[in-house]
Image (cartoon, helix red, strand yellow):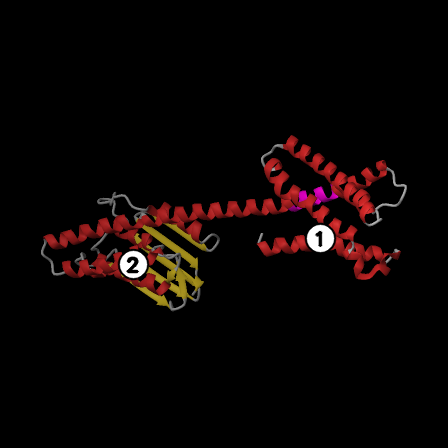
Amino acid sequence: MKKWVKILMHAIFWFYVFAWHNIIGSLFTSEKSHGLSYYFDALSISHYILFPSVFYFNYFFILPRFYKKNKILKAWIGWVLLLLSFIALRYLIQEVLFFKWFGIKNYFEGTTIGYYIYDNIYYGGLLIIMSILFWILDDNIKSQKEKYLLLEEKKTAQLAFLKNQVNPHFIFNTLNNIYSLVSSKSDKALPSIEKLSHLMRYMYKDSDAEQVSLQREIEYINSFIELQTIRLSNKDSIHYSFEGNITQQTIAPLLLIPFIENMFKHGILNNPDKPLQIKINVQENKLTLSTSNCINNNSKDNSSGIGLNNVKRRLELLYPDQHILQLQQDENMYHCNLQINLSKQ
């Protein structure tokens, strides 16, 4: 609960107790002739001190120290002592001292002690009960807020762990590719190193944000595919297409790349008759990624990586009820279809 909301709730409560309640009462009694002086006489001022004292002593001391810690017996003892203190102080101030100093009393002449105690058990008890209700409401809201913050912290930690697992696997595979190019003294080695440096800058710097522009993420994917195709003898073995406008949308960084990386890990490469198919389509705020590849059963990459279970978890955390993921394997083909509802910048 926001602080100003809490203050407003308490202000409304005390307005009712001290002002509105008295205004309504004055409509039916002779007290209405007193005017504004009614709210600033000695008895009223003593009410302004005694009533909130009971309310907030319970609110700030008894409830958090005993009730919240499940010390119920001590809480009950505190409430009884607080109620007795309220009755005794009110009697001392309003019936003894005020009569001695100003010649006034709060209760009519002839009021018995028994009735006085009974009547003030009602007022004091009502203050304690209202204090308990206000405190329980505030405490429940605080507890819910703390649970939400803990879940958010856990979610952030999970996402950081899951995202960080992307980088080592990609770097490991790419360095292996570049090592092969260097060993064969290929002219593609230096451009590959330069392209890898740009990708690493994005992975370790730009991707720290919760959201990045979709355009930047697509550029990363384009560079990734280009880097992977450098080692292929036949570039027709990869069919990649993109359609749509990507100037306004945002996306969680490094979210799409695992599906594309998975194709290069487990698909058949350098075979134009069985190409890797990658299609990305963006229509307003809806992104669709479709991939298909023939599974390479003879040479499967068993290196550790984030895996599809990892990216599924990221999707659940980042886009709950905002994505559809369909994975299908039939015979030797593997198909992926992902739809995400994106945000705008």
Residue 163 relative to residue 116: left or right: left
Q: Which residue is found at the position 34% from the left and 57% from the top?
A: 207
Question: Magenta stretch: dominant SS?
Answer: helix
- Pointer 1 or 2: first along the chain: 1
Lateral position of residue 212 relative to residue 98, left or right = left
Residue 14, numbered circle? 1
- Under mark 2, the amino acid is Tyr
Instruction: Pinpoint residue 257: horizontal percent, then vertical percent.
Output: 32, 55
Q: Tell which residue pokes out farthest to the right in this image.
A: 110
**Residues in magenta, as a range:** 125-134
Whether the magenta-drawn stretch holds residue 254 is answered as no
Question: What is the number of callouts on the image?
Answer: 2
Q: Is residue 163 above or below residue 124?
A: below
In the visual, does 325 lie left or right of 183?
A: right
**Looking at the image, which residue sits at the far left?**
185
Q: Which quadrant is the C terminus positioned in?
A: bottom left
Residue 4 in sight from this viewpoint: yes
Q: Residue furthest top?
A: 73
| Residue 95, image x, y percentages | 82, 43
Instruction: Please name the residue that numbered disc 2 is placed on.
Output: 202
Q: Residue at x 19, y 60 (%)?
A: 194
